[in-house]
Amino acid sequence: MSREWPGGLIRKTPVTPTGPYQDGTAPGVWTLDQMNYWLKQDLWPIAGSGATPIGLFGGGNGPINVIDRINIASVGNATDFGDLTVARDSLTAFSSTTRGVFAAGVISMWTNISNVIDYVTISTSGNAIDFGDVSIQVAQVGGFSNATRGCIGGGATPGAITSIYYNTIASTGNTTFFGNLVVANRAMSGCASTTRGVLAGGYEDTTDIEYVTISTTGNAIDFGNLTVAKTFTSSGSNSTRGIFAGGTFGGNVIDYITIATTGNALDFGDLGTANNGAPGVASSSRLVAASSGTLLQYVTISTLGNSVNFGNTTVNRQTAAGCSNAHGGL
């Protein structure tokens, strides 16, 4: 029989916190063991912006201009958000809490590589608006951001390049040179904490992981290695842990890193269905990975384990880009 103490705050059996995970409520007092239990259930509330964690998927093989929207905190099929200004694949994306930015890409079979940057207001469905241009025409780039600055790194022109460029997300304009990668590469994938941006994987069977401090400029520094070589992975992060899931050559393997440290990635689990050239979007609790078809899968970032089905995108999403208003860089 449960016992309730004065004020209704302390109970023998703790009350389940009220979701969603971000901006939920926990009216009571728990021990650390109880709190850890709810964390593992993806139910312990954390501070957040109060906004619904929205993920956007844009562009893709075809090329296509379609942008899809999902609510990362729930499960279900994506809905149509709007269109990019230019249809393209092999592009990248980064975001703040308010804006999603899509950059670069291939317009037609490597004969027309784009330097276009366009943006949307994440809370409002609609077509993208011109933002500016990347300093070079480039595709197969990786992207990451904090709340202020978005960066893209590596890529192909069509040969692999070392350059990293950045924009101030709240403004519009062309990119500025940030620094260089340790190794020239393309088809890398990115994630970030509020201070560090990380790029990993790429062609030529690489397991390379590199990082920069987003608020400064300068060359990337070696971080460590993935467990297996990966290209075009579904990547994302919360404020502490980065996830790199599947990808070309990577099978269904999911890797993770602790962003604040350096070192090699560790095994996280497996995707239920291997993907190929598919984007990922993240909130503080979940990474949602697209596939080279329409399938969406997700994992809980703070735990280890295999992916769970989420729903489907409105169109096939190979070599597309993803961003959200709730990732670990914000």
Image (cartoon, rainbow, N blue to C red):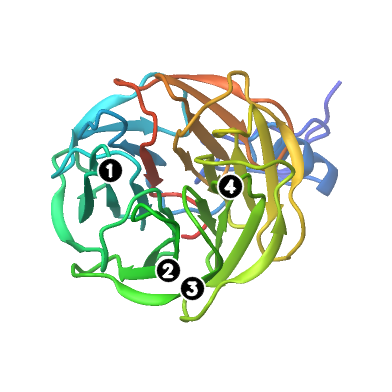
Q: In this view, does 216 lie above or below 183?
A: below
Q: Residue at x 34, y 39 (%)?
A: 56
Which residue type carries mark 1?
Trp
Residue at the disc numbered 4: 204
Q: Is mark 1 on a helix, strand or loop?
A: loop
- Give the number of the mark in front: 2 or 1: 1
Q: Residue at x 37, y 46 (%)?
A: 51
Which residue type carries mark 3?
Asn
Q: Is mark 4 on a helix, strand or loop?
A: loop
Residue closer to the observer: 123 or 145: 145
Which residue type carries mark 4?
Glu
Of pointers 2 and 1, the one earlier in the residue sequence = 1
- Mark 3 touches mark 2? (CB < 8 Å): yes
- Give the number of the mark in front: 4 or 3: 4
State the separation of the CA atoms marked 3 and 2.
6 Å
Which residue type carries mark 2?
Ile
Residue at the disc numbered 1: 110
Q: What element carries label 3?
A: strand
Of pointers 4 and 1, the one earlier in the residue sequence = 1
- Give the number of the mark in front: 2 or 4: 4
Of pointers 3 and 1, the one earlier in the residue sequence = 1
Residue closer to the observer: 309 or 185: 185
Residue at the disc numbered 3: 180
Q: What element carries label 2?
A: strand
Residue closer to the observer: 65 or 12: 65
Judge whether residue 179 can be spotted in this image.
Answer: yes
Residue at the disc numbered 2: 164
Q: In this view, does 130 lie to the left or right of 6?
A: left
Relative image position of residue 295 (x, y in whole percent): 45, 19
Q: Residues within 10 Å of mark 1 (few under 14, many from 20)?
A: some
Q: Residues within 10 Å of mark 2 (few under 14, many from 20)?
A: many
Q: In which quarter of the image is residue 3?
A: top right
